[in-house]
Image: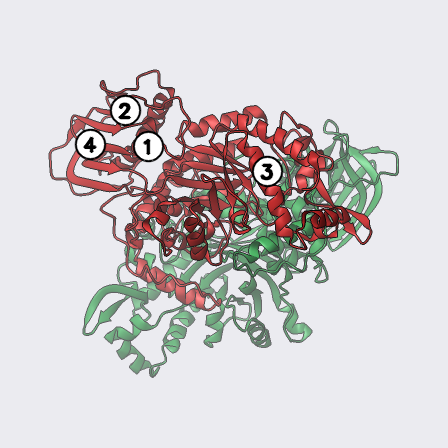
Chain colours: A red, B green
Amino acid sequence: MFATLKFAALLLALVVCRAAQDYDYNDAEMDEEPTDSQYGSLWPLPQKVQISTVVFKLSGASFHIIDAKESSSGASCILLQNAYRRYDEYIFTSSRKQGQNKSKKALASDISELQVWITSADSECDSYPSVTSDESYELSVDSPVAVLKAPKVWGALRGLETFSQLVYKDEYGAKSINRTDIHDFPRFAHRGLLLDTSRHFLPIKVILANLEAMAWNKFNVFHWHIVDDPSFPYLSRTFPQLSQQGAYHPYTHVYTPSDVKMIIEFARLRGIRVVPEFDTPGHTQSWGKGQKDLLTPCYSGASPSGSFGPVNPILNTTYDFMSMFFKEVSTVFPDAYVHLGGDEVDFSCWKSNPDIQKFMEQQGFGTDYSKLESFYIQRLLDIVTTTNKGYMIWQEVFDNGVKLKSDTVVHVWMGNKVEEELQKVTEAGFTTILSAPWYLDYISYGQDWQKYYRAEPLGFKGTDAQKKLVIGGEACLWGEYVDATNLTPRLWPRASAVGERLWSDRDVRNLNDAYSRLAKHRCRMVQRGIPAEPLFTGYCAHEYKGV
Amino acid sequence: MFATLKFAALLLALVVCRAAQDYDYNDAEMDEEPTDSQYGSLWPLPQKVQISTVVFKLSGASFHIIDAKESSSGASCILLQNAYRRYDEYIFTSSRKQGQNKSKKALASDISELQVWITSADSECDSYPSVTSDESYELSVDSPVAVLKAPKVWGALRGLETFSQLVYKDEYGAKSINRTDIHDFPRFAHRGLLLDTSRHFLPIKVILANLEAMAWNKFNVFHWHIVDDPSFPYLSRTFPQLSQQGAYHPYTHVYTPSDVKMIIEFARLRGIRVVPEFDTPGHTQSWGKGQKDLLTPCYSGASPSGSFGPVNPILNTTYDFMSMFFKEVSTVFPDAYVHLGGDEVDFSCWKSNPDIQKFMEQQGFGTDYSKLESFYIQRLLDIVTTTNKGYMIWQEVFDNGVKLKSDTVVHVWMGNKVEEELQKVTEAGFTTILSAPWYLDYISYGQDWQKYYRAEPLGFKGTDAQKKLVIGGEACLWGEYVDATNLTPRLWPRASAVGERLWSDRDVRNLNDAYSRLAKHRCRMVQRGIPAEPLFTGYCAHEYKGV
């Protein structure tokens, strides 16, 4: 159905053509004509899958997704009822021709129901997902009923997606599904995506569409890098002047409290956490516009130059501001964690400022400005701790020896010495997540999804205890060159590669099998309305209809 | 309005951040905070522009674009009437806040009309544009009327676009335009864009949207690489089995004769030629599915391997087929030129085939298969000549010494020895177009538009007569990794850089000035409905509304 052409021939033509253009990307690992995967269009691949050749039919008229009688969750669980409606729509108006399986031995009989059975007493229907949420599920597709069992609603959400991926149209166009048994759970608890709404503002609609796509790929953390140097679109109730002055536009380019609430609820309904990042003391130029004296005045010789550096760490007013600000953040964002940034602090402005110099002397920091940075971060962490939040920080904070709470998540992003860093962080006993191999803003020609797919978070040397501290990773799409016009096709299906790496078993890494499933998965995303770009030459039965 | 942040600071932050990710892209040429261009949002920059500080207003209620009394073209010219409607819409529903000029000295008075005056006796209203079409125009914006003078409708179209780019909203939201005099004409006659509808099928809607964007960027040739190895979406009346068997799908993934007609007329109304490419003898795998014996059977030892190579050059049936096929093509496509391809012929299959070997011997070609290739191409060119078409060919055909008609356009695409090739081709007296620096399918991180912008088609050593033979160039967006989901943002505004290089004066190459104008131009494209991607961090007053 996909890629009707000789793949090897195409690849050859490609390489010949590209050589003349000084092309040095080597696609050689996928050197055979891709064959259909035995797992159809499943993505990410579940932990244990048994697909039989027995085929059942699903009638759009009679088939329903319903609560199992034994389920601890009933019709009052809005999260599940919403999910049933969503997946009913996907199955009966969208997912055609995906994962088609031509072998058909048994007589076709009907599946009339998918029963969803929440097995634990507390379904967590009205809770927020967390890093310890149970996302496991068991799916048994048989006639006359299919059963999806999960301890919590989070597993049910994942299982519904999997069920929808099993449905295909047979050669007559009839909705079909094979007898299947799946036992599934994520390899890593933290499977995140970072979007940056400061370098370019992203309209709500774009964020929601990508949360939806995240759910299809079993991501469960939206890391919202909400503010940064270029703009401050977060509308703070306590300090409204921050966005009033710091956003690109105070009305059209901000996220109001109700926008934020809507995004958090939309994400919750899909089992996705929203972890906001308020990065300090660097990356804060936009903060300075609405908050006087927050940033360090830079000096040119003996007098202020008029420009500003990182947050001013030597004023009490700074910490008063941070206390009030993060108190608000702790109530607006329900997640147990907030990301505090702490990356890429430029010392030149601090060095130029005579008041800072004096403070350094008083504190006995000598000329080691990383000590000043640590001084600031330490106080910030103490402030955030009083709000009863855990925190995530970029790796520099750990590297600089700041004292961290034991539940801190250290975020590894630097491209050099990744494995040493993972070793060090876990040796020190901290949980960690990995982003270094998954900076999706670095685009390049060709099938770069393979590079993301091959990355292995546990490839470093360490004890089992150390490996257990790696709780997952995040794909990052920084916003320098990305806005509503190009974000979605640039993200999908490239992020899908990260999605499978973080969900599926470590041994799931066959590129040909992945290509076959991912090509179908991307066509399914297109059909569900997300303009996911192609992996390579080929087509979808239903092409993208927008422009 | 755009880029409110300190640009230099941002750039620094970017470079620091990227170093950690082994980033080696150097943006250093644009090292200053960009200032607004004195030319507002004009793109591509006209040849001669004088913008005064005197500001006039345009009232949406009273302003009209009309035929000048003296014009040789009246209300019966559908091309112009359509263009008036289009630009009226752009000016009064879309183009806000672009090219705003804060200096405002004179009293504002109104411009009530833009009079369009076709000055030559034959307006060419009902003709097709050609490589010799006159696209020059003079635009005088003054009160009470602005006048656009052009010898032909083609210049009027270009001038209408320029006029629309001069309109902006003042600080009260009033549509405004400065007193302006422009005398404009293209530097190169052939300013093309290649789209590939074989590697991925592009829905009509996508093609039309991009023709529209081409007109905004003063492109005038749509090079339609319509078929290739992967699929044959062109529905031929003479050989319907070609698409029946060779398209990805015989109904949903084909261009019918009426689709083709519509695309050609849509393009004509915007002064854009449609030059189809039917590339042979290589790149023809999809042709072989519907046309028996057209391709060369490859051999594995003494017996056919089951796979096929290039067009079989030793059979008379091949030339009978080509005669009939290109006779149809010559009637379906009105342009004076057809692109015959001729690139990247792989000899291995020909070498394997005993019949071909025998033919080589008979012809005294020895083992030089480029002679066989030339033998084929020579006959093909003769066939196409009988249809009264000129032809374009990729550079290999020239390189291999095939005898070409004097009006042949040689298309230079190979990335190595570009200047030598231009020298050789023009020394031999052939007209040529350049694509080598403008393969937009090769994406990379950062502001690669600058690379496209800096390329200079006349940078090679040669006489004035040789330079005159370079009639232009084409931006190419090959389709391996591009379909409806990602084509448009990947193309714009990167292709705009090529648009200005091919239209504006050779000396127009200041990157800061270009950045300022292009950033506004891209926001204008976004507002007109095309998801053109951002150049860098910043925002548009009206962000893209789709997903």
Does A113 sit left or right of A447 as displayed? left
From the image, state whether disc 4 or disc 3 is nearer to you: 3
Is residue B250 in view?
no
Secondary structure found at label 3: helix
Tag 3: amino acid = Leu
At a point 67% along the width and 55% down the height, the residue shown is A367
Disc 1 vs disc 4: Cβ atoms closer than 8 Å? no
From the image, state whether disc 2 or disc 3 is nearer to you: 3
- Most distant residue in the left direction: A106
Q: Position of residue B360 (x, y in %)?
A: 31, 79
Sequence order check, earlier mark of 1 and 2:
2
Which residue is identified by label 2?
A: A120
Measure the alpha-carbon separation of dots 4 and 2.
21 Å
Q: Position of residue B6 (x, y in %)?
A: 70, 47
Tell me which corner region of the image, top left, top right, bottom left or bottom right, holds residue A379.
Answer: top right
Measure the alpha-carbon separation of dots 1 and 2.
11 Å
Measure the alpha-carbon separation of dots 2 and 3.
39 Å
What chain is tagged by disc 1?
Answer: A
Which residue is identified by label 1?
A: A134
